[in-house]
Amino acid sequence: MSNREPAPRTTPARTTSSAGAAAVLAAERIVKTYRRGWRRDSVRVLTDANLRLAAGEIVGLVGENGSGKSTLMKILVGSLEKDSGRVVRHGSLGYCPQNPILYERLTCDEHFELFARAYGLELAVADRSQQDLYDELGFDQYRQSRVEELSGGTRAKLNLGLALLHDPDLLLLDEPYAGFDWDTYLRFWELTADRRDRGRTVLIISHFVADEERFDRIVHLKNGKTEG
Amino acid sequence: MKVTGLLTWRYLVDYARRPINLVLLVLVPIIFVALAAGAIADFARIVGGVQDASQLAAPTAGWAAAFLAGVAGFFHILGSRQADLRLSLAGMGTRRVLAGRLISASVLAIVAAGAAVGALALRTGIADPGRVIAGTLMFALIYLGIGAAVGASIHNEVNGSLTVIFIWMVDVFLGPAMAGGGVWVTRLFPTHFATLVMLDASSGHAGPLGDLGWALAWTVGSLALAIWLYSVRSSTRTGASHVKSGSWSRLSTGLKLGFREYRRNIAMWVLLVVVPVFFISLSFYITPDEPAPIQLADGGSVATRIVSMVDLHGAIMVPITIGFLAGLAGLFIVPGSIEADARLSLAGFRTREILASRLGVIAVAALLTTAVSLVVTAVDFSPQNWAWFAAGNVAVAAIYGMVGVLVGVVFGRLGGLYVMFLLPFVDVGIAQNVMFSAAPPDWGAFLPARGAVKILVDAAFTGGFDQAGALWGTVAWLVALGAANAAVFSRIAHPQKS
């Protein structure tokens, strides 16, 4: 285990809403109900979720298991349809899903190549960014390995790396460090703090109480509503 | 004993809660027995199997029971190995866990045999109930052992399922009920002797053990193999003191990496080589050279001609093989990566680019499948009109490649595997099969391969082209399936409802 300490924050923690700042993302009155099983039973997950993210902040989204954190994040990303409400986003988006969504038989390099095309990155920029991510997250030795050959932790690194590749204005990360070792966990926070200092916005779903002091602001999701 | 009973019950509940198991339990007896028994009996009689048509339907119950029991045995062992190990380590003990698995698996084999015999009784009636019930049970137990042995040896559920299906297909299609059993290699198939027992036909090559003795030896042997493999795997693990735990550039990149991902699927390559050789070459090899009537259009008129059964069987096995392989290609290429494609879409790829990439890979896979099958065919048979024979087969490949995509999206990769085995079997193998009578059955006109098979059968035995109607029908199916595939891909670019 490393003795390195977590990177210090460059701005103090804030517990108040940043409603006054220019919003990179604004979500208002989000409602979502799932219908499950043969009888289409209703499960109301979100009843009134509101969120406003300003440039240059790291926000934690916390709540109990099944409280709807991942559902809210998928709605913010645009991969899940909401029943009602409004989401407005500005700038480029990077999304890291909770479970690594990857192509089993493609290598790490090939994933970066594919996503670089998707983001419309120039080759030189993509190569530099890709190498930085390999170095920062420490999985350069696996660049030629197929996903099916990777450990859970390395898959998680690639999963996160794909979200960071184009240095997006807004990062939505759903428990991105599950499976990371301690060193990688610390590097992840350094990397996140660095992006925040460069004006990027990061929303992270987290379960860890120990993470709370790393966030500039924390939003609680309880009974389908956001608090804080 | 009480604990073993509880284990057995929990294992059965676990089986019943997998929806695909229940679907197969209903569908397989319906398709193999109720729907296909008559047609298969005709087919086997024509190809040279046993002559008594009333007896010929009996093995269909065995086939259905074998399929169900093989699948049940496979999943019973595969999906639970880790959990069983944990239970064993927690204090349950390997012997009790093994006993629970054995009893519950045997119950499943009995249920499978019961469903199959019930369907046969409804469809054709049963002349010799004792023989049919005992025979069906032997089929079920043999395949229970095979399925469990595969489950203990192959860790991947798709590859293991393919292995069980492949063994079953070779065993059934080339076994004594279909091909007479005269060729020595078919005597090595698992249910060769059990089929002869069910048909009440003496093989003449069973030696002192007799047909029944060999059938029972296969039954006991396959179960013993499964138990041995399961025990070896369990004891190896329990022996340890603890468990260790730009649009064009996007399109070209999508195509390039899509094909790269496809070609890295080793199971597909194995199938691509093994299935055509086994199915097409063996069908030429084992079919007796007898005359067969067939309706052909030539020079604007339809006439019944007599051709060699060897050529007819070989020609029809080509699209069956291609339909099966292309369907699997569609199934493996798209549904397994649909979530990742959706992520790619969020990242910036356009829907049409993903669609074109994926369909491009399916097209390559379909052409490759067709090319391999035609090369294998060319060794034994030369169609009168190669171009249209190839075109008809390419159409079958394209149709089932796209059907594979749709089936995969609806049923998932694993459930879709079983559906994609059944669909080409029913469509190309039964509904379009001109071996049953000179012309295919009327109900087959509503299935997608009708036009394409008409074109290729016509091309196999006539030099001209007289199937314009069939061609338009095929084009209509291709357009409809292309539109359905496009709809599937457009969905991934939109937010999901749940």
Image (tube, rainbow, N blue to C red):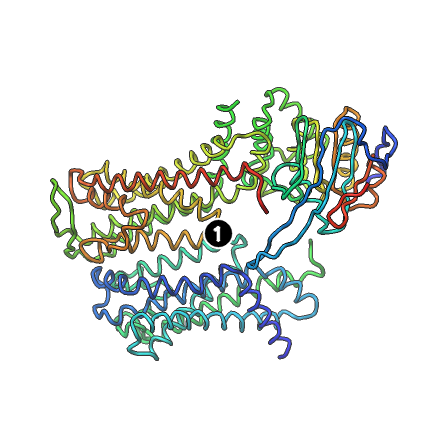
Q: In this view, does B18 lie to the left or right of B315?
A: right
Residue at mark 1: chain? B
- Residue B55 picture location, percent across and down: 26, 72
Residue visible at 44% across and 61% down in the picture: B24
> In the rendered view, would you say A195 is above or below A39?
above
Q: What residue type is labelled 1?
A: Phe
Q: Where is residue B30, by image quadrant?
A: bottom left
User: Is residue B424 something that shows in the picture?
Assistant: yes
- Residue A131 picture location, percent across and down: 66, 26
Quarter of the picture containing the C terminus of chain A is top right
Pick the front one: B80 or A201: A201
How many numbered marks does the figure carry? 1
> In the rendered view, would you say B268 is above or below B141?
above
| Label 1 environment density (alpha carbons within 10 Å; few <14, some 14–19, many ≥20) | some
Q: In this view, does A27 lie to the left or right of B471?
A: right
> In the rendered view, would you say B160 is above or below A205?
below
> In the rendered view, would you say B492 is above or below B306?
above
- Residue A174 picture location, percent across and down: 70, 41
Residue visible at 65% across and 42% down in the picture: A84
Pick the front one: B248 or A133: B248
Residue visible at 71% across and 61% down in the picture: B241
Pick the front one: B468 or A120: B468
Question: Which SS class for mark 1?
Answer: helix
Q: Name the residue under label 1.
A: B411
Q: In this view, does B325 lie to the left or right of A34?
A: left
User: Is residue B269 something that shows in the picture?
Assistant: no
> Farthest right residue?
A12
- Residue A207 picture location, percent across and down: 77, 46
Residue visible at 45% across and 32% down in the picture: B356
Pick the front one: A34 or B189: A34
